[in-house]
Image: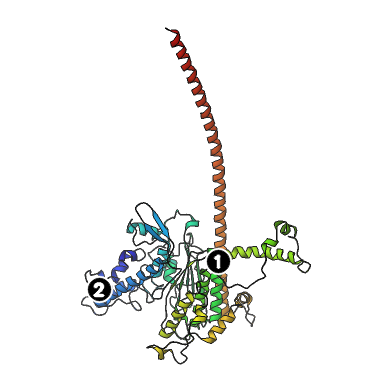
Amino acid sequence: TRRGVLEIFHEDAFLNLLEYTPSLKSSSSSLFQNKEEHGSYQDVKLLEKYGLTDDCPVPNDATSRSVLWKYCQSVVGTSIQASNLLKQKVIKSKQQYKEEAAEMDVAIHWGGGRHHAHSNKAGGFCYVNDIVLAILNLLDALDEYDDRGKERRRRRAERILSPKSIPIHEEEENNYDENSNGRLPCKDNEDDANKKRVLYMDLDIHHADGVQSAFYNTDQVLTVSFHRHEAGFFPSKSGSVREKGRHGTPGFGYNINFPLFRGCEDLAFVAVFRYTLYQLVEVYDPHYVVLCVGADGVYGDNLVGEGDGWNLTPEGLAECVRIASELCGGGREERKEEEIDPMDVNDQDVDRDSNIKNVDNMTPKEHNISLLRKSESERKKSEKRKKRRKLFLLGGGGYNPTNTARTFLLCTAAACEGARPGMLWRELPTDVPRHAHFPRYGPHFELVSSSSKAELFGSKRNDDEFIAKLKDFKDSHGGGLDINRKMLVDGIKAVDMACMFIQGRNENQIKKEKDLRKIKGSFMDSVSDEYFLICSEKKKRGINEKSRGGRRRKKKKAKTEKTP
């Protein structure tokens, strides 16, 4: 992609240190000429300011810097191209714009997911944030081929992005005043009903601080991050459950952090993911679901370490992707309840039997009426779940090559479950096929673990019970909640509070629209009455004038006839 697209989110000074081409020398080239390592003390301070040291270093030689710049362009360009496949095509012609259906329902870019990069700072092996730019593209705030130019694109993106100047945690430490510093989001005149919405869920073990800081002010992106949050665990300055969006902006209440404990396993992870996804889709009703699937939460990751990470398996992360794919495809795993034929029940029967409470004394028809009444609310809630949505998968961390390869392969198969059920658990072979790196998958050489598969299949029926018991669980010592359970309970409460807040805001919006329609209706009625009176008066005047004119003409004709 071009630099102009990167400038929509990233600052120019930061990109100047990254950009290098043989034909165009950037400002970073002067930092490394005739200097050892990273130049003078001032140069090191400058690089540290923009996070271009330690895990995100800038190479010394020109060739490596040119490769780094091409890598940044390729990562962002690929994510934008993948998001373009999910969007409706707009065909421009001289007379009109025509929209066609999107080409794909699912898009995958395992090389993306650079969620730690801020607008003016790199970090966590992430130089540029392809997730933010891809989401902006899904929200129609990023158009590489917009005829109105870069300023037009920048203004459209400013309506969504948070202030560029400093990250979220630094704003809180410095008592950041958004009325006096930084770039504020512009007011969007577009109706809330016509806005596109994106649900972003991050499954990486590290907090998605870059994505959170970018969309901290907007309600068009609902950011959810499952991660570890402890002192000394990167990034330690963000990821608290208390971070819910900036006060005084539309984004307040549209940011959810779900910290999970050390050693979290598949059963707990899948249960909280399923609960969070279903609850938020019902309330938020997104057009796109974006998943950042990091494999660094899998047991045995080389960077995180066995004692500090989660104990997930590739099958557990693939199950989460399968749940999301099935939901975006319009289906959902639900227990089969007793079917009721609405044609056998009329409105009079429902009104007559509305006070029946004793189920034992009910006739079969009365029992069907009561079940139908109860199921109406559930059917209304499930309408949004049955809606088809676009699914966008991105990669993330993963520092064990074999675990990462197995995770991404299983997640690719799981992403097809919305259109092809059984792709993950039935059609894939159980063993790793032979190839050049086959010995590295020993000693089991399993592609799909039978034990993990059995645990995940058994957990489908127990997720609701697990969530219900989790809220009422108390430590056996009687001193309160266990630390691990308390983290889960706090995360579930954060999800429930966000759902209540969003639901209340939606109801207020619906009420405002109804009141506005009433006001417009009464206004139009009064205007129509006045218009009718005015028109009737004009009509009478016109008739009188015509009649008078006709009499005068007759008199004139009579006079002219008498004169001769």
Quarter of the image containing the N terminus?
A: bottom left
Residue under circle 1? 386
Horizontally, is 300 left or right of 70 in the view? right
User: Mark 1 and mark 2 in contact (Cβ < 8 Å)?
Assistant: no
Mark 2 surroundings: few (<14), some (14-19) or many (≥20) residues within 10 A: many
Along the viewing direction, whichever of 264 and 481 lies nearer the viewer: 264
Nearer the observer, 181 or 491: 491
Q: Secondary structure at mark 1?
A: loop
Give the image location of residue 486, x and y in percent. Answer: 57, 76
- At x 55% / y 64%, what residue is drawn? 384
- Residue 18 appears in the figure: yes
Tell me what residue is drawn at x 45 percent, y 87 percent. Answer: 432
Residue kind at label 2, given as amino acid type = Leu
Where disc 2 sits, the SS reads helix
Res. 276 mark? none
Give the percent coordinates (x, y) of residue 276: 54, 71
Residue 438, position as x, y percentages in the image = 40, 89
Picture quadrant where residue 3 is located: bottom left
Mark 2–mark 1 distance (CA, rounded to whole Å): 56 Å
Amino acid under disc 1: Lys
Which comes before the other along the chain, label 2 or label 1? Answer: 2
Within the image, what quadrant is residue 40 found in?
Answer: bottom left
- Per the rendering, the mark at residue 31 is 2
Camera-nearest residue between 407 and 427: 427
Where's the C terminus, which quadrant? top left
The answer to whether residue 488 is left or right of residue 5 is right
Taking 180 as reference, is 66 above or below it? below
